[in-house]
Amino acid sequence: MFLIVLILSNLGYTFTFTAMGDTGKGNDGQWEVSRALKQVCETRNCKFNLLLGDNIYQEGVTSVDDPQFYEKFEKQYGDITMPFYVALGNHDYGELEDHWERGGYEIAYAAKNPQWILPKEYYYFEMNEVLFIVLDTVLLKHNKKVKEQAAMVKEALTNSKAKWVIVAAHHPYLSNGKHGNAGKYEGLPFPYKVSGKYIKDFMDKNLCGKMDILFSGHDHNKQILPGTKKCDATFVVSGAGASATALKERNPFYVQSEELGFILADVTNDKISLEVINSLGNTTHTHVVKKH
């Protein structure tokens, strides 16, 4: 067993969760979105939030007791009564992505705050008919722990009989934001560590054709995009948890928005309804993913 498996079997078959990333700024934008999240989830009975990385800007934390945990997480979300399943982002490892111990402090913080779920850099859990796989794409981007994460994905897919497979990670596979598509991040086809080619290779080999939805952040906007012939999945970017940046029309898309906010997902037996929600708590777009 490569990691902790969290099985939440006592919940109903139909459930709601949210997803957002790039939150940890402690700025006005984060406050706006946190208030909207609380308002919506009190009404919709959200079971949890997927926190999609860059949890603590600008350089992550320097210890498990770093006051940034309070300023950029507890203060914002402590009164929202649901757990946050955490992925690590590039800023969580320092601005230059080279302070590898800082991800470990975020893992250790989970023992202090039960709202913060992060048993390891990468892990999986099940909720009824959904298998959730959480990756560390920062490690993948730097060609680290690739075999270990591939083994974890294989274990999760082999052991699970869930109907849906949802992946959460910081870096997108496809994006119309400024960072762009994996393998060509920042418009660069090389070097591999900058372009995200290692991330694309990992997804192509281990998850394309097996996952239904990939939730990611990194670009500070909200997008829902169709898959490609090579990777038939729905790609959701939800990185507008504290700030927002401009979009392009690089890839076909169902929905894209430059507003602050998050994504809400309603899961049922045969479909997942994705709602794009702004910082006022209003649903601006809806897209339905149906099971093939």
Image (tube, rainbow, N blue to C red):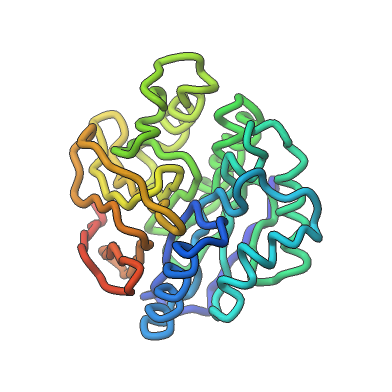
Whether residue 161 is visible to the viewer of this picture, yes or no, is no
**Residue at image location 38% in from the left, 62% down from the top:** 262
Q: Quadrant of residue 102?
A: top right
**Residue at image location 30% in from the left, 57% down from the top:** 259
Numbered circles on residues, count: 0
Horizontally, residue 178 falls left or right of residue 284, namely right
Whether residue 11 is visible to the viewer of this picture, yes or no, is yes
Q: Position of residue 161 (x, y in %)?
A: 46, 57
Q: Position of residue 130 (x, y in %)?
A: 43, 61
Q: Nearer the viewer, residue 272 or 116?
A: 116
Horizontally, residue 244 falls left or right of residue 161, namely left
**Residue at image location 26% in from the left, 63% down from the top:** 271
Check the image and report above or below for 272 versus 8: above
Q: Nearer the viewer, residue 150 or 281?
A: 281
Most extreme residue toward the bottom is: 43
Q: Nearer the viewer, residue 227 or 126?
A: 227
**Residue at image location 62% in from the left, 72% down from the top:** 75
Q: Position of residue 260 (x, y in %)?
A: 36, 59
Most extreme residue toward the front is: 28
Horizontally, residue 77 falls left or right of residue 200, namely right
Q: Position of residue 173 (x, y in %)?
A: 38, 36
Check the image and report above or below for 177 versus 230: below
Q: Quadrant of residue 210?
A: top left
